Image (cartoon, grey):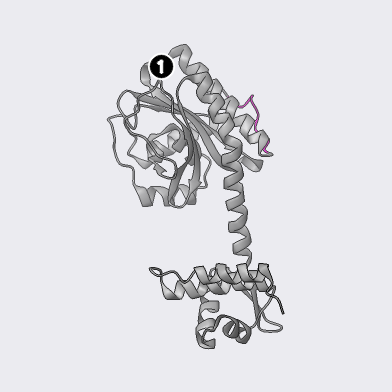
Amino acid sequence: MPTNPRSASQRASVRKISAPGSSKSLQKALRILLHLGQNGPELGVTQLAAALNLDKATVHRLLNAMEKFGMIERNADNERYRLGLKLHELGNKAVESRTLQTEAHRFLLEMSRRSHETVSLAVPGAGGILCLDRVNSPHTIITVRTNVGAHFPAHATAVGKAVLAFLTDQELNAIVLRNGLPRYTPSTSTRPSDLKENLRQIRQRGYAIDNQELERGLSGVAAPVLLAENRVVAAVGIAGPTLRFRGKELAQKIALVREIAAKLSASLGGAASLSRAS
């Protein structure tokens, strides 16, 4: 019987997990997940052990471990296993992040072109606020740069605070506990009470300002990208020399980040308004 090309490629993808250097237990768990996804919807321990050439006790142990994290679910009626809803949730977040970055980039280009400054896109992530995208400006020299994929010093940057302001208290406290509130300049807020008051003001007015809190001579403004029920998915921000973030120029930059944040929110299906509190 001829080999099914799709089945062969699927089996190859499972075998690739066995590359040296990673935990053997992790390799086996990932093989189980992939096999279930490709051959499910439900399989028993014996079927999985035979298909993957693993010991039944090992398969059972790994299934139980993954079940605790919602990656696997057990059907109590037939004692078979299927992929858990946690994988669906993670998959949705992965798609959302890619969609967000794709949608946002054109708006970042517009914001950089209109402001002549460096602009960035920040998102809530594991352990803090991540830089998902940025567009550098030849008109701005920034010593402290946050690279794409790296964490922003959230309490000392406008984009970081614009995201923090719309997180739950539990999420905010977890980030502060993990990263602390280190001082970068004399303007950096290092007291939790001061930070929370600043975040309250940001929620009220709809934008955040960084006045030399990360680097002397560098300032920034940012606005949150909100979806339904004020759920924050990102923030867009502008950063540049402090001299260009005063008076009329500051007001123009605030208006611009709010406009771009509202446009991005609308493109993602949100209901952000250009007429939020000023």
Q: Which residue corresponds to the image point at 58% horizontal and 35% vertical from the top-left? A: 104
Residue 2 in the image, given as x and y percentages of width and height? 70, 76
- What amino acid does circle 1 point to? Arg
Could you tell me if residue 257 is visible in this image? Answer: no
Closer-to-camera residue (103/233): 103
Q: Quadrant of the N terminus?
A: bottom right
Element at badge 1? helix
Q: Identify which residue, 41 or 84, lies in the foreground.
A: 41
Residue furthest to the front: 2
**Picture quadrant of residue 271:** top right
Q: Is residue 9 above or below residue 124?
A: below
Majority SS type along the magenta span: loop
Residue 234 locus on image (x, y percent): 54, 39
Q: Nearer the viewer, residue 79 or 14?
A: 14
Determine the residue positioned at 66% across, 42% down.
228
Write the start and end of the magenta stretch as one range. Answer: 270-277
Please tell me in which quadrant of the rendered image residue 110 appears: top right
Q: Can residue 274 be found in the magenta stretch?
A: yes
Q: Could you tell me which quadrant the C terminus lies in? A: top right
Residue at 29%, 37% (x, y): give it. Answer: 183
Residue 207 magenta: no
Picture coordinates of residue 197 (x, y %)?
A: 44, 35
Mark 1 neighbour class, 10 Å CA radius: few under 14, some 14 to 19, many 20 or more: some
Look at mark 1 in the image and give the residue it sits on: 244
Using the image, determine if residue 40 lies above or below residue 193.
below
Please say whether residue 244 is visible from this viewpoint: yes
Is 28 located above or below residue 159 in the figure? below
Give coordinates of residue 156: x percent, y percent: 37, 35
